[in-house]
Every structure is written in C-alpha cells, then in structure tokens.
Amino acid sequence: MIKGVVAIVGRPNVGKSTIFNRILGERVSIVEDTPGVTRDRIYGKGTWLTQDFRLIDTGGIQLENQPFQEEIKAQVEIAIEEADVILFVVNGRDGVTGDDEFIARMLRRSGKPVVLAVNKIDDATLQGNIYEFYALGLSEPIAVSGSHGIGIGDVMDALVGAFPEKQQPELEGIRFAIIGRPNVGKSSLVNALLKEERVIVSDIEGTTRDAVDTPFEHDGKQYVVVDTAGIRKRGKVYENIEKYSVLRAMSAIERCDVVLFVIDGESGIREQDKHVAGYAHEAGKPIIIVYNKWDAVEKDEKTMNRVTEQIRAQFVYLSYAPVLFVSAKTHQRVNTLLPMIDDVYHYSQLRIATNVLNEVVMDAQLTTPAPTHNGQRLKILYASQVAVAPPTFVLFVNDPQLLHFSYRRYIENRLREAFGFDGSPIRIIARSKE
C-alpha cells in the first residue's frame, strides 16, 4: 500500500537526480553536471521501513531567464500539488542562493511538510555549512551526500515520519479503475456505465482533473468506479501528457480490484498505452482491454479479428486479458462490461485446492518434461498456492535456476486451461525443495 507521494525540488545542479536514484537504488533519472538536464518529472517507487511511497524527480527552478524555465516551474508546481511531502535539496557548498530563497517561499505557501536536505556534504569538514540554511525558515537541515549515500537514511526517516495519516472511507463493492491516455473516452465510459452524466465530458484533453471514486449499484451488486485524471492546463504551459498521466493512473491502479484499460478506436494504439498497461500488469491487477469509439471505426466482418490480432501483437504480456469493443457514445456493448468485471475479479480471487493443483502440475510435467540444461532437468516436486490477487503459486523444485521462462509459461498455460483465470495475471515462483 502506497503511504504517500514525495516530490524532490530544488534549483538546477544541486543533486536532485542523484538523491532520487540513491533512494530508489537504481539509475532511473539522468545524471549530468549540466544544469537543466531533468526537464520532466520522473516517477519511481521507494520503500523505507516497510513503507512504500511514490517519488517524483523534477527539473530545477532558477530565477534567470533560461530555456524551459516556465515549463519547468509549471511542472514543479504540479508536482508540489500532487505530493504529500516535499524533499527540498540545496547545495551545501554554494550556501543559500536567491533561487533557494525563491523556492523556499513557494514551499511555505504550499503548506506541505518539507524535508530540507543539504547535499554535497561529503566529509566532516563541510558539516558546518548546513547551519546557514536555517535562514530558509523550513525544517531542520539534514546533511547528506547523494553521491556517497551519507545521510540518506536520516532523510528517509524524516520523509516517512512526515506522511499524513490518510483516513479514507472504505466504499463497498468491486472497485475498478478506468485508465488510458487523455481523451480516449474514459469519462464518457463512466457516464455510460452509470447511465447518467456524472462526469464532465469534453474533447479537450484533461477535463478530468482528479481521480474520483463513484459508488453505484447494478442488479443488486455494489461497485466503485475510479475515473482517472488527465492533463491540466497551467496558463499557457501544458506539461508533458505522458509524464503527467502516469502518476494518477498509478494511484488509481493501486487502489482498485480490476483495471479497465481503454484504447481510443479512432487514433489506435500509441506508445503511451503500453506504458500505462504495463504498469497495471506489473501491479498484478486483473485487466480488461476496452477498445472504445468502435462506432467511429470503418469496419467489415474481419475488422474485429484484425484489431484483436494487433492488440495481441502490441500487448504480448496481456495475452490473458479479454478484449471488448464498445462505444461509450452509443452504449454499444457497455452492458457487457460489469458481468466481465465480475468474472475477472472472481478469477483474481480464486483459490485452488492443493491436491487438485498438484494433479494438474504433475500431469503437465509428465506430458511435457522440462528440457535439460547442462545435463540437468527441472523436477517439480510439489506445488502450492500462496496468495490471490494475483493468484500466486510456489513450485518446489530440485533447482530453481532450471525453471526456464518458456517452461514457466507452459505451466501457466496449463493452469489457465484447467482453472480459467481469465483477465488475471498469474505469478509463479520457484523455490528449492530445502
């Protein structure tokens, strides 16, 4: 469960991206000694003391009239709005600058908790440099070195400790999120499902600003639909659509039971579709692919099969996800969505009796033994289901290294043949018999 969202802000070249990568434990953000390299917000997931949180890296703010400054400032403002806690990074070797003071005023106006990290304090001789940063009027400065990892633990403690306690009423029913690029018809689909104009619909990208949970009842069953937000306008500055839509989609995906991944039938599949769908898959959520605006597609009797083949080719990892062709505008096939949501939710929660599971797995192994590798062959000794949502199976084997990807896929296919699991990803873990 995501505890909160952290935005890293600061002027250019103070080491924000280095600290971002240090917290995540990997080189996600571009690091270069040239101011302004990071121009768009970059997202990641961090963990500290069992607490998971989202991390946003931002471009640097400076007062001078530099290229992209208006765009960067607008993006940082949006990042601050999205964040629960701000990590303000300054350069301990430069002292307090006019840009630092400008950013500090922005942060004080935001009213958000701020953790102040004084970076580039690489040894004890520089420790005294942190005291002048008390003048910014923010939290107590923490000496850190992003490049050496010094003080990062103290920063993480402060961040996690500053997360607000979010008390959200738990709504009853199957919770499904509608995700996709801006202007693919998500809000129209919500209204078609609810049979009322509950959500504003417009051709302008970004009409939906926030993710909204809407409970409703259908045929005596309770549901909660989450309509995810698109782009928003900041004066004359539009921030990057692809970067901005991701965080809201992530939040909705993490809180839902089922994902409706919407593709625009008029414009077809875009690269951004793959990013959003990939995150839903990695989160282990059951997925239904909804090809919207089907009424606007010129078609013959072969069009549906042809488009389905294109979807399967572009989203190979979603081979388990059913595809539904709908029109939110004309309500074509919209009535089949809720029964399909029920089905995929059922499969994501399905538990298989251990004896039945082992019969299927052992029969699969006898029918098609694993190939040999360096004279050794994988032997599955026992299987057990250890979790649902997604269904997760542990195979106890003679050597986990011998479970090749192709054989893992073969076992998954045999499980799907036997038990269905339509729309739900399956996770298979190999462990040594010891």
Image (cartoon, rainbow, N blue to C red):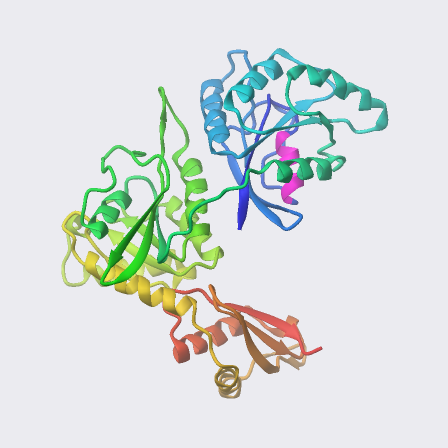
Q: Name the residue: 63% across, 74% down.
A: 402
Q: Say left or right for 392 vs 207.
A: right
Quadrant including the C terminus: bottom right
Query: Whole-percent x and y of residue 377?
Result: 63, 81
Q: Is residue 58 above or below residue 250?
A: above
Q: Within the image, what quadrant is residue 186 found in?
A: top left
Q: Residue drawn 59% across and 21% down?
A: 11
Q: Where does residue 49 sit, x and y in percent of width and height?
A: 67, 48
The front one of 416 and 88 is 88
Farthest right residue in view: 125
Image coords of residue 167 (percent x, y): 48, 44
Q: Is residue 129 left or right of residue 100?
A: right
Residue 182: horizontal and vertical position, in percent? 32, 39
Q: Please identify the quarter of the rendering in which residue 422 is found.
A: bottom left
Is residue 17 rendered magenta in the image? Answer: yes
Q: Is residue 133 left or right of residue 61?
A: right
Main secondary structure found in the magenta portion: helix
Please say if 156 is above or below 313. above
Q: Residue at x 41, y 32 (%)?
A: 240
Residue 417 part of the magenta segment = no
Magenta stretch, residue numbers: 16-24
Viewer-nearest residue: 254 or 179: 254
User: Which image quarter: residue 320?
Assistant: bottom left
The residue drawn where x is 78% and y is 19% is 129
How many numbered marks appear?
0
34 above or below 225? above
